[in-house]
Image (cartoon, rainbow, N blue to C red):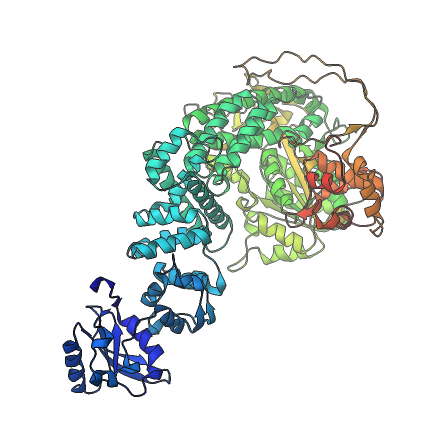
């Protein structure tokens, strides 16, 4: 019988008394069926419900004599109101004397459900709590009641449901009280966080078997199938590894799952975990990691902590995978650092196979979940290698004139220089297999670029002999930049002319991409492309910068530049002022000199010379020279912000470019006669990689110099980079015209869409190219036999370029996607409900331009497409897109939308097809 006697502790007694004290009617003895816990306090006080407390003494008796002795001892005790005796003595053996003193004159059986109702202030309990498998729950709730300082259990008033009781119990038992505020439910994300807390899993381990099992089953119902796996790990003392082990569990999901991997995983998790549970657990952990990575990608205060948490867990996962011999099986995992390295190895294998294979491999690298937050430089470097691989696959470059060469360099070859510089700077830090492939690409591009420099030097000689403003051979001369570009701008609003001394086309490509990408600046052009001028010879600052700023061939220092700049603008009825290095910084607390700020706020033309790039060539670090974000050019951000605030256009121009020193450490200066600078001399003999030039554009040594066209020649001690020679990178002067609004464009000028500035090979072609259907059956074009390509192993040879195919026979007209949309009944119906819709040709042109670009274009490109259609629009570009959303976004589905802070337009081609009921065959 003793085994059937329930053990009662202070909390049960307190709960029982709280429900019974109102009915004691002054009686001082309460007999309770059970056994008081041996370690329970003998005396304590309980609330009476009216704000007072009553002192209680508890004893245990196993016989009638023991009951009598306890009562007699109580009568002799002062300051104790009530005696509670726990006992297993049958009620019929109790003497009449004691019965008269007892509450309700009988032994009270403990009803845990009544106690729970009282503790929660509930009118009733969920019926399930009174039967299997939840019979353990009331006792657990009584035992787990928070003490008075914590406010006890939350009061319910109505029926205490099973879920409410379990939320309360789990909150206290596992330390998750705050999780359930506002009726929230538990999820695996919260349990994973709990598994990493100090002492959290140990709290679960201390519970009784019935309670542990009940909590686990409830969490499985509430948090999903993954919860039991996590709780088993916690009970095994592996809570700190739980998240990392969830990454390993992904080995049983996807196409890479294998029996061997499943067996290895079973040894990690032990018995009891079903495959379905492990798959659910892997998905839950991936969801948690995705959220953490999102936090790490933000700029919030928790981003660094989130990133460190991600790194710690995933490195731990890699170690566990290695211990379990699962690294190879997890090579495709999108979270593991080892998986990222495996993707880079895939890229190393793909680069020699061609641009398409390389692009697919790079996309696989970029899709890794850590790519953006942990490996952005490696991803960017890999992307540059793939871009160069595409450039090597373009047709052999054609050079028809000096003017055409510098224009093509700023539009195309200079972008290759940009990628090449980054590959040179960062490729050596890659692991050996990838570094070797990067080097192969780098060297192939260098060879091709050297051929272009040599061809340019050959054309430069005859051109230099006779080139003037009047007879420039189609080239823009550096001395004509102010007259040709800055002067037309001044007729609308005086520009800020910023001279970035030594800015190459590669640097200009990066700066232009960043400045126009944020949507704060529009690039303007009078000829539909980014301008490029030709520097004077030799391409050194002392003559090329003075020539630029004076508007005529000149030589001299800052005083010559200031006087020449003011004189040029005075000729054209404008006052102008030029600021040099020491005149830019402001006093303490101010970024810019007040005189410079005042000048920008005036109606004067303002010029500023920034020497950051040129100075970096003297003592810059290798990696720094390859990467030129706006923030690296000292004072550029402040100047641009000031110009924008005053509504000024900006002419961002160089005086010459530069080449980087990529020679080995063993290479010294070339021995030569008449050395005047790092990249030009006066000696008459011309060596390999050099050319002798003479004419009106040669402003040193009486009009005759010897200069290198090869980037590898220098005549002076080593620096990080040089200028003065006639390589394309030195002689090309890029010019970017930026404006806070396209409305500042002069007559006949227009905004330059970003898509027209980037060379076609810079981004991969859209994976879903525009597909059109024939208006009538068309004849198949005759196949054109291409010129043989280099064989395997020769993919990076100098002649590994595609031969342009012959023009195929003309085919009948095809219906574009935009035209197909216009022909639908849905479109014709939708158009009736749009006030002043754009002309049909405008709508079709915008759809086709977006479709051809893979779905996304800048606002400027959309404007260009609309303008090029020949149709009319009644609003500005952003307004046009708004009208198109009303026209195309049927029933709220986003067919077309503004993204990236309303700077770009996106077309969802699949939704467009579905909403306008185009057949699969037609698209």
Vertical arrangement, residue 247 with respect to residue 22, above or below: above
Q: In which quadrant of the rendered image does the N terminus lie?
A: bottom left
Residue drawn at 54 percent across, 23 percent down? 446
* Left or right: residue 29 compared with residue 477: left
- Residue 246 location (% of width, % of height): 41, 42
Residue situated in front as seen by the camera: 807 or 572: 807
Residue pushed farthest front?
Answer: 92
* Left or right: residue 504 compared with residue 193: right
Taking the image as drawn, is residue 480 in sight? Answer: no
- Residue 258 location (% of width, % of height): 42, 29
Residue situated in front as seen by the camera: 801 or 168: 168
Vertical arrangement, residue 683 with respect to residue 538, above or below: above
- Residue 523 location (% of width, % of height): 69, 43
Vertical arrangement, residue 857 with respect to residue 585, above or below: above
Q: In which quadrant of the rendered image does the C terminus lie?
A: top right
- Residue 211 location (% of width, % of height): 33, 57
* Left or right: residue 242 compared with residue 583: left
Instruction: Give the quarter of the image for residue 98.
Output: bottom left
Residue situated in front as seen by the camera: 27 or 856: 27
Residue drawn at 80 percent across, 35 percent down? 820
Taking the image as drawn, is residue 614 in sight? Answer: yes
Question: How many tags in the picture?
Answer: 0
Residue situated in front as seen by the camera: 577 or 301: 301
Instruction: Give the quarter of the image for residue 9.
Output: bottom left
């Amino acid at each position: 019988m003793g085994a059937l006697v329930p053990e009662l502790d202070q909390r049960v007694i307190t709960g029982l008394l709280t429900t019974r004290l109102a009915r004691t009617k002054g009686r001082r003895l309460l007999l309770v069926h059970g056994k008081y816990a041996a370690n329970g306090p003998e005396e304590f006080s309980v609330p009476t419900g009216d704000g007072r407390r009553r002192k209680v003494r508890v004893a245990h008796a196993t016989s009638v004599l023991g009951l009598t002795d306890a009562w007699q001892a109580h009568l002799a005790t002062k300051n104790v109101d009530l005696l509670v005796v726990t006992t297993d003595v049958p009620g019929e053996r109790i003497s009449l004397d004691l019965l008269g003193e007892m509450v309700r004159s009988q032994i009270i059986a403990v009803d845990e459900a009544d106690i729970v109702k009282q503790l929660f202030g509930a009118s009733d309990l969920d019926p399930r709590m009174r039967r299997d498998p939840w019979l353990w729950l009331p006792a657990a709730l009584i035992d787990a009641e928070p003490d008075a300082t914590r406010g006890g259990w939350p009061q319910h008033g109505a029926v205490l449901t099973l879920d409410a009781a379990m939320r309360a119990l789990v909150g206290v038992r596992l330390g998750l009280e705050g999780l359930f505020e506002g009726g929230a439910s538990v999820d695996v994300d919260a349990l994973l966080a709990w598994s990493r807390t100090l002492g959290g899993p140990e709290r679960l381990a201390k519970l009784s078997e019935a309670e542990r099992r009940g909590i686990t089953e409830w969490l499985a119902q509430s948090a999903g199938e993954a919860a039991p796996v996590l709780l088993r790990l916690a009970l095994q003392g592996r809570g700190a590894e739980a998240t990392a082990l969830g990454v390993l569990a992904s080995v049983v999901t996807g196409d890479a799952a294998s029996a061997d991997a499943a067996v290895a995983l079973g040894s990690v998790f032990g018995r009891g975990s079903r495959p379905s549970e492990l798959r659910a657990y892997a998905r839950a952990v991936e969801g948690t990691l995705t959220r953490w990575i999102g936090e790490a990608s933000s700029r919030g205060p928790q981003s660094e902590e989130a990133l460190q948490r991600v790194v710690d867990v995933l490195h731990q996962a890699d170690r566990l995978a290695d211990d379990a011999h699962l690294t190879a099986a997890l090579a495709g995992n999108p979270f593991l650092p080892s998986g990222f390295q495996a993707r880079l190895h895939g890229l190393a294998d793909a680069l020699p196979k061609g641009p398409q294979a390389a692009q697919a491999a790079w996309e696989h690298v970029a899709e890794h979940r850590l790519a953006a937050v942990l490996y952005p430089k490696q991803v960017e470097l890999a992307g540059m290698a793939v871009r160069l691989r595409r450039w090597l696959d373009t047709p052999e470059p054609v050079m028809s004139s000096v003017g055409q060469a510098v224009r093509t360099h700023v539009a195309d070859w200079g972008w290759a220089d940009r990628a090449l510089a980054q590959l040179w700077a960062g490729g050596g830090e890659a692991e050996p297999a990838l570094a070797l492939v990067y080097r192969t690409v780098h060297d192939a591009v260098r060879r091709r670029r050297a051929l272009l420099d040599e061809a340019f030097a050959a054309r430069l000689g005859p051109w230099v002999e006779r080139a003037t403003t009047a007879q420039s051979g189609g080239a823009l001369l550096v001395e004509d930049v102010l007259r040709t570009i800055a002067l037309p701008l001044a007729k609308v609003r005086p520009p800020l002319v910023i001279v970035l001394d030594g800015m190459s086309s590669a640097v200009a490509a990066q700066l232009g991409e960043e400045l126009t990408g944020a949507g704060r600046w529009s690039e303007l052009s009078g000829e539909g492309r980014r301008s490029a001028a030709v520097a004077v010879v030799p391409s050194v600052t002392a003559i090329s910068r003075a020539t630029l700023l004076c508007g005529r061939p000149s030589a001299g220092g800052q005083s010559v530049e200031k006087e020449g700049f003011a004189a040029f603008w005075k000729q054209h009825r404008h006052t102008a002022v030029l600021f040099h290095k020491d005149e830019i910084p402001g006093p303490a607390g101010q970024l810019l000199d007040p005189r410079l700020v005042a000048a920008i706020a005036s109606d004067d033309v303002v010029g500023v010379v920034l020497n950051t790039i040129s100075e970096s060539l003297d003592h810059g670090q290798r990696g720094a020279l390859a990467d030129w974000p706006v923030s690296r050019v000292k004072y550029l951000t402040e100047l641009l912000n000031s110009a924008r605030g005053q509504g000024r256009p900006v002419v961002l121009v160089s005086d010459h470019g530069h080449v980087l020193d990529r020679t080995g450490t063993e290479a010294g200066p070339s021995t030569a006669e008449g050395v005047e600078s790092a990249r030009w001399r006066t000696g008459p003999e011309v060596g390999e990689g050099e050319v002798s030039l003479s004419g009106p554009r040669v402003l040193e040594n009486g009009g005759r110099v010897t200069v290198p066209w090869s980037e590898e020649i220098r005549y002076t001690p080593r620096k990080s980079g040089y200028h003065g020679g006639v390589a394309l990178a030195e002689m090309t002067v890029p010019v970017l015209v930026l404006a806070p609004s396209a409305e500042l464009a002069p007559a006949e000028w227009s905004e330059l869409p970003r898509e027209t500035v980037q060379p076609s090979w810079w981004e991969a072609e859209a994976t879903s190219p525009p597909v059109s259907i024939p208006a009538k059956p068309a004849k198949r074009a005759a196949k054109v036999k291409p010129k043989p390509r280099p064989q395997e192993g020769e993919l990076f040879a100098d002649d590994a370029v595609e031969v342009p195919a012959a023009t195929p026979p003309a085919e009948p007209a095809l219906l574009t996607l935009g035209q197909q949309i216009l022909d639908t009944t849905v479109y014709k119906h939708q158009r009736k409900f749009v006030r002043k819709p754009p002309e049909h040709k405008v709508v079709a042109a915008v759809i086709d331009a977006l479709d051809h670009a893979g779905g996304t274009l800048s606002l400027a490109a959309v404007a260009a497409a609309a303008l090029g259609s020949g149709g009319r629009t009644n609003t500005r570009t952003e307004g046009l897109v708004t009208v198109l959303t009303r026209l195309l976004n049927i029933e709220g589905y986003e067919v077309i939308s503004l993204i990236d802070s309303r700077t770009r337009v996106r077309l969802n081609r699949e939704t467009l097809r579905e909403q306008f009921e185009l057949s699969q065959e037609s698209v």
